[in-house]
Amino acid sequence: MKKSMTPKATLIARGSLQDFWGYSKEEATSQALVFELHPAVKDLIEASGIPHTAIFGLTVNGSRQTLDYNVGENDVITIYPFEESDRSELDSIFSQPRSFVVDVHLGKLVKNMRLLGLDTVFNKDWTDDNLIRISNEQHRMLLTRDIQLLKNGNTQFGYWVRSQNPDEQIKELFRRFSLAGYLAPFSRCMKCNGLLNEVPLSRIEDQVPPKVKKWQSRFFRCRDCGQVYWKGSHFEKLREKVTELTQISDG
């Protein structure tokens, strides 16, 4: 029998990188990679389902390499997630992003983020190119459920949100990122992300229902879109949510 002429390598994905393969084990899990010529390791890794934006360390046969490394036969490639990275070597956006851009799949998450005062821009009509450009130019962490968006060669800062539930999604972000220092609950407009300023009733009287004027004395208006806010009947429920999320961040 002829020996197979198709070279193979082994890819080991550690920790949370296994999420992209659907594994839940804590130990390293591997896949066999079959290839032709000497492709860049980045291409093989992304073909296996893991985007370059999720990789924070790479070794080949025990030696550190970059994503440009050209794979050879019988190479053993190990890739490391954020939790196994050296934070001192990383841009702070990967651990403590100060602002975010969110894609169309996470519209409900945006409300929770703005409720907490996190700088979060969103437009359901933005294309992938729009999202990537805004992320790169404004140094915003790109949040998405679309793994292909994170594989785009132009994407520099991105995170794949695992959960599909908006309340679980915000908790996931607080477990992944250190956000406590950027929390400013009830400081941003839920509609457009603009900052709120307190204003006297006399300046926005035509925007407040007559009944509200009788029991509410403090009002806030968005600097950008002019939306007016006050502490309505739902305020206590919102404050409970803020407290819960803050505790996650502190933990």
Image (cartoon, rainbow, N blue to C red):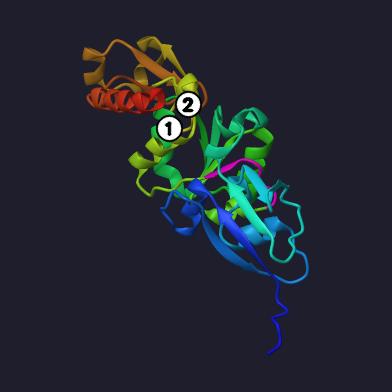
Amino acid type shown at disc 2: Leu
Q: Residue at x 49, y 27 (%)?
A: 178
Amino acid type shown at disc 1: Phe
Please report whichever mark, 2 or 1, sits nearer to the chain's N-terminal start: 1
Who is closer to the viewer here, 193 or 205? 193
Task: Please tell me whether the stretch drawn in magenta is mainly helix, strand or loop.
Answer: loop
Q: Residue at x 40, y 37 (%)?
A: 170
Segment tinted magenta in the rendering: 153-159
Using the image, tell me which numbered label, if any, was put on residue 174.
Answer: 1
Identify residue for label 2: 179
Who is closer to the viewer here, 39 or 14? 14
Q: Secondary structure at mark 1?
A: helix
* 155 within the magenta span: yes
Disc 2: CA contacts within 10 A as few (<14), some (14-19) or many (>=20): some
Q: Residue furthest front?
A: 1
Q: Secondary structure at mark 2?
A: loop
Q: Is residue 6 above or below residue 177?
A: below
Spatial CA span between label 2 and label 1: 7 Å
Image quarter of the C terminus? top left
Name the spot of residue 245 as percent of width and height, x first.
35, 28
Q: Tell me, yes or no, whether the two marked residues, 2 and 1, touch with CB atoms within 8 Å.
A: yes
